[in-house]
Image: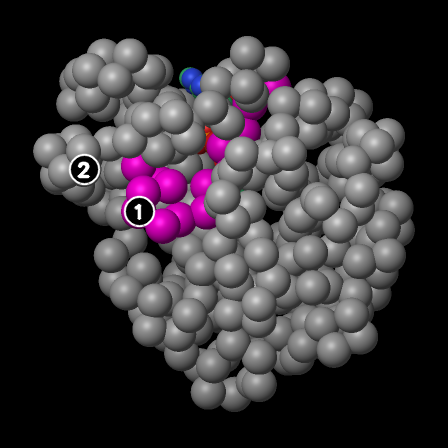
Amino acid sequence: MSQVPSLTLNNGVDMPQLGFGVWQVPDSDAEKAVATAIESGYRSIDTAAIYGNEAGTGKAVAASGVPRDELFITTKLWNSEQGYDKTLRAFDESLDKLGLDHVDLYLIHWPLPAKDTYVDTYKALEKIYADGRARAIGVSNFLPAHLERLIAETSVVPAVNQIELHPQLQQAELRALHAQHGIVTEAWSPLGQGKGLLEIPTVVAIARKHDRTPAQVVLRWHIQTGNVAIPKSVTPSRIVENLDVFGFELDPDDLAALGVLDEGKRLGADPAEFHYGA
Ligand code: NAD
């Protein structure tokens, strides 16, 4: 029985608030890492076609012995495949690699505004959703203007926008827009990629105070902020550590101290500019 709470998406589907991300995990290692995650209690896995590890992820899911309806599997459409027909084909390929007959969440990976195909692409996601092959659909890296256009020109409000989000990039504007439309905010690079964020004295001090690690403090911040978080690790002890964030609580002083770390600092690409692979 998983200890991880769920958030209810705008179509009534429940999504675990903490999941396991597999970006930069080679396919040959993904099976082991995902197996460790599922054994440790994770029930949500975040992959993408471009990560090249849908097959390894699918193998671990199949071997896990956990009933399919207790798992929440997300994958994403890569940039080169945007457009209505290409999206439908790419989705078939992803399902094939995963060895599944449906995913729980299918996302458009990047908006590619200069290409201007995300509305048609999303219409293909609506077809996939209507056919019951994705229990929920959404987007990733969408800026406010992209979300607003999508909502105006299509029928299904995205269930999720997966965006870069951590204490140094708190994304207040997008989070407010999501709340207004009932879109769940999912944080990628929730640990700031394990770099400077976890060494900031404020974070280290709060960790000491609660007898926890800096990573646990940051993940707890995501949980209390209402985000879905999908930390990545291939180290078994960290995989376990990152899930163990439900036995303590940050107090208002901690939250205030973490709140002021926001400096709008992106580690990844700016979605307005990023057209890699398109
Ligand atoms: P992350 O913030 O999860 O950081 C991962 C890194 O932090 C690890 O490689 C490791 O070096 C370190 N780390 C992990 N656990 C730790 C711990 N307990 N203590 C100390 N260090 C620790 O960064 P990420 O992998 O970039 O993001 C997580 C997931 O988000 C990805 O795997 C992927 O699924 C998703 N993602 C999506 C997009 C997108 O465009 N939609 C982009 C990037 C990542």
Foreground pick, 222 / 53: 222
Q: Tell me where residue 68 appears, x and y as whole percent.
A: 79, 46
> What residue is disc 1 on?
225
Label 1 residue SS: helix
CA distance separating discs 2 and 1: 9 Å
Ligand 1 under 8 Å from disc 1 Cβ: no
Q: Tell me where residue 189 appears, x and y as whole percent.
A: 44, 37
Q: How many marks are shown on the rendered structure?
A: 2
The residue positioned farthest toward the front in the image shown: 1
The C terminus is located in which quarter?
Answer: bottom right
Query: In which quadrant of the rendered view does residue 134 lie?
Result: bottom right
Foreground pick, 176 / 123: 176
Q: Which residues are magenta?
A: 221-234
* In the rendered image, the vertical position of residue 107 relative to residue 5, given as above or below: below
* Residue kind at label 2, given as amino acid type: Leu
What residue is drawn where x is 62% and y is 74%?
122
Q: Is residue 230 magenta?
A: yes
> What residue is disc 2 on?
255
